[in-house]
Image (cartoon, rainbow, N blue to C red):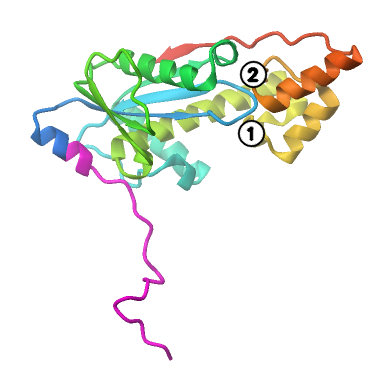
Amino acid sequence: MARRTSESPLLFELPPVPTDAIERRLRRSGHKAIAGVDEVGRGPLAGPVVAAAVILDPRRIPDGLNDSKKLTAAAREALFEQIMASAHVSVVAASVLRIDTTNIRQATLWAMAQAVRGLPHAADHVIVDGNDVPPGLACRGEAFVKGDGRSVSIAAASIVAKVTRDRMMVRAAAHYPDYGFERHVGYGTAFHLDALASLGACPLHRTSFAPIRALLAKENAAGSADGVDRFDEEFLVS
């Protein structure tokens, strides 16, 4: 049997999980209200992009926080309830109309900034998942690539944003039942693309995204397009 040398990779190494190391560093620098910020919904063909800002209580950090994509739906729901009960939380959805009239990046940054502004307790430092700090913050911010896998605050924000958006899309499925939004929450799955091909776009679809734009252009060329009303819902939950 082959022996593992010191140069060999660990075959059963556990994946890294978020910690509060970033938050502890910032608290040592004098910051007390550190808001983690993340978004969900940049990639889907339909529905809003949702951003959340979360200030965790360092004495009540829920166990099991992680990047929302690495958690089961049941784990996300359970952690969502714990976060909402123990932290300062703000959630903002940027509408399909905003996405289509600006662009997905600008809509995302707007939602992030609005989420920070909507916190019931003002943040004195913001840590954001990704490459960009939203403009116009009242305090300093830092961006961390893959931050939802590094920081418990950003991980908490990713969970809140994901659960909120998924619930929105399940509600939307009741209004547009043939698209399967409760299954794919707007992402471009085979089922979703088949539904688009047979039904056309609905008001939840992002006309600025290439597959929807191509579909509408094809319908216009065939003279069968009736136009798509924009789904315009932006809200704040604190």
* Amino acid on which disc 2 is placed: Ser
Residue 235: horizontal and vertical position, in percent? 47, 12
User: In the picture, which quadrant includes the N terminus?
Assistant: bottom left
- Residue 17 drawn in magenta: yes
Residue 8 drawn above or below residue 68: below
For the C terminus, give its image quadrant: top left
Residue 207 location, x and y as percent? 68, 17
Q: For residue 122, which quarter of the picture?
A: top left
What kind of element bears circle 1?
A: loop
**Drawn side of residue 106 relative to residue 16, left or right:** right
Q: Which residues are magenta?
A: 1-24
Q: Say left or right for 73 vs 158.
A: right
Q: Give the quarter of the image for residue 87.
A: top left
Mark carried by residue 208? 2
Type of secondary structure dominating the magenta stretch? loop
Q: Earlier in the sequence, mark 1 or mark 2?
A: 1
Residue 94's x, y, as percent?
50, 16
C-alpha distance separating marks 1 and 2? 15 Å
Q: Nearer the viewer, residue 40 or 78?
A: 40
Can residue 59 be seen in this snapshot?
no
The percent coordinates of residue 142 (x first, y second) are: 27, 29
The residue under the point 90% across, 16% down is 222
Q: CB under 8 Å between callouts 1 and 2?
A: no
Badge 1 is on which residue?
A: 187
Question: Measured along the vertical axis of the image, is residue 14 above or below residue 233?
Answer: below
